[in-house]
Structure formats: structure tokens, C-alpha cells
Image (tube, rainbow, N blue to C red):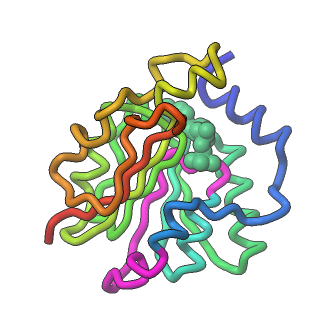
Amino acid sequence: MSGPSRWDDKYRTAGLAPALRVEPLLKRYKNTIAQLSQPRTALDVAAGACHAAVYLATQGFDVTAVDCSAVGLALGQKLAEREGVSISTIEADLGIGDLPAGPWSLVCCFLYLNRDLLGPMAAILAPGGLLFYSTFNVHHLNKAPAFNPLYLLQPGELAEHFSMLDVLTLSDGDDPKENASWIAARRPA
Ligand SMILES: C[S@@+](CC[C@H](N)C(=O)[O-])C[C@H]1O[C@@H](n2cnc3c(N)ncnc32)[C@H](O)[C@@H]1O
């Protein structure tokens, strides 16, 4: 089994999370995010159960979450309702379609690697807009040897893909103890 049905099954089994999970990268840059000017729009790419999307909605953003899993997105709507905010969701296969057109004040993507979308994620940012991205890198194979290496970042990949952005922070696979790479960056105004 692959694609949406696999993820649907995972989200169905997991159910609604007991608490909103806030991505460390978003928490770390909370003040920078708060300084983005109105109207503040955010896109959560491969949002899953939409924790990042819902968190950004609690921070005053007009948020759209896109994912191929209808079950994940439905959980996201329930999570939003529980947190007292609203989000928009789009069910789409990002392997074949384009990202929702911008400009977006903020684009985030966590734990999803589609190299064809990295450049477009930066391109749909508004001038001055912020990008937050994090996913596993090759060092993850030390912990999970069966993980498909195609979905793991190589050292230096994030800097290369996001070279058009001004970096706020970057951990790009140089440290073998870090099994994830991450970047926070701003599109030049
Ligand atoms: C590991 S989960 C991460 C979810 C969320 N970003 C998070 O951090 O909790 C990966 C997500 O990517 C989504 N996904 C995988 N392939 C996809 C595709 N081709 N199009 C859209 N979403 C996809 C899955 O449905 C799943 O929700």
C-alpha cells in the first residue's frame, strides 16, 4: 500500500492528538513570525494532521494546509475547532500538482521531502516572507536503516535548494549526530 491510503490509515489509527504540537522551529522564531506584516497568510505543505497550520492560525495567520490525506486534513479541522481557530484545507497529490499559488507570508513544510517542490516553496513566498523547512537527513539511517534513502536529505542540500533566500538558521547535515536538517529563511524584500 502506498500514497494517500497509507497515510489515511495511519491518521485513522492515530486519531485526534491530545494536544497541539508546536514545531520547535516555529516556536524559536515566534517573534520574527509575529513581525510579518498584514495580511498574514501561511501555507503548510504536506500538513498531515495540521499541527503547524493550526498553531499558525492561533498566531493570527490565514492558513491553508495541503496534503494528500483526507483523513489527516479532517483531523486538522477537528484540531482547529478544538483550538478555537479555523484553517482551510486542500486535498491534493503534491507529486503531480503545483503548490497553491502565492504570494504567502509564510510557507512551512515538516517531515516531507519532494525535491521538485523546494524551489517552488521559496518562489511562492511574498517579498520578506518566511520559509521554515525540516526533514530527516542521511544520518537518520543510523537510527532507521530501512528508511528509503531517496527521502533523506544529503549534507548541503538545503543551502543549495534555498540559495535565493536569506538564511536565519541552517543545519544542513554536517553533524552526524543530527538526523534532521532544517532551515529558516527569508525571501529578500
Ligand atoms: C511524516 S508526515 C508529516 C506531516 C506533518 N507535516 C507533520 O510534521 O506532522 C508526511 C505527510 O506527507 C503527506 N504526503 C506524502 N506524500 C504526499 C503527496 N504526494 N502529496 C501530498 N501529501 C503527501 C502525507 O499524507 C503525510 O501527511
Looking at the rendering, in which quadrant would you find the N terminus? top right
Q: Quadrant of residue 4?
A: top right
Give the residue drawn at x 77%, y 32%.
9
Q: Give the residues drawn in magenta, as a range.
A: 30-50
In the rendered structure, the answer to whether residue 140 lies left or right of residue 43 reads right
Q: Quadrant of residue 10?
A: top right
Q: Position of residue 110 (x, y in %)?
A: 52, 47
Q: Is residue 40 in the magenta section?
A: yes
Work out whether 125 lies above or below 82. above
In the rendered structure, the answer to whether residue 22 lies left or right of residue 154 reads right
Work out whether 148 lies above or below 69. above
Give the residue drawn at x 60%, y 78%.
58
Q: Position of residue 127 (x, y in %)?
A: 18, 69
Ligand 1 in which quarter: top right
Q: Position of residue 156 (x, y in %)?
A: 29, 34
Q: Nearer the viewer, residue 12 or 105?
A: 105
Give the residue drawn at x 75%, y 63%.
78
In the rendered structure, the answer to whether residue 138 lies left or right of residue 144 reads left
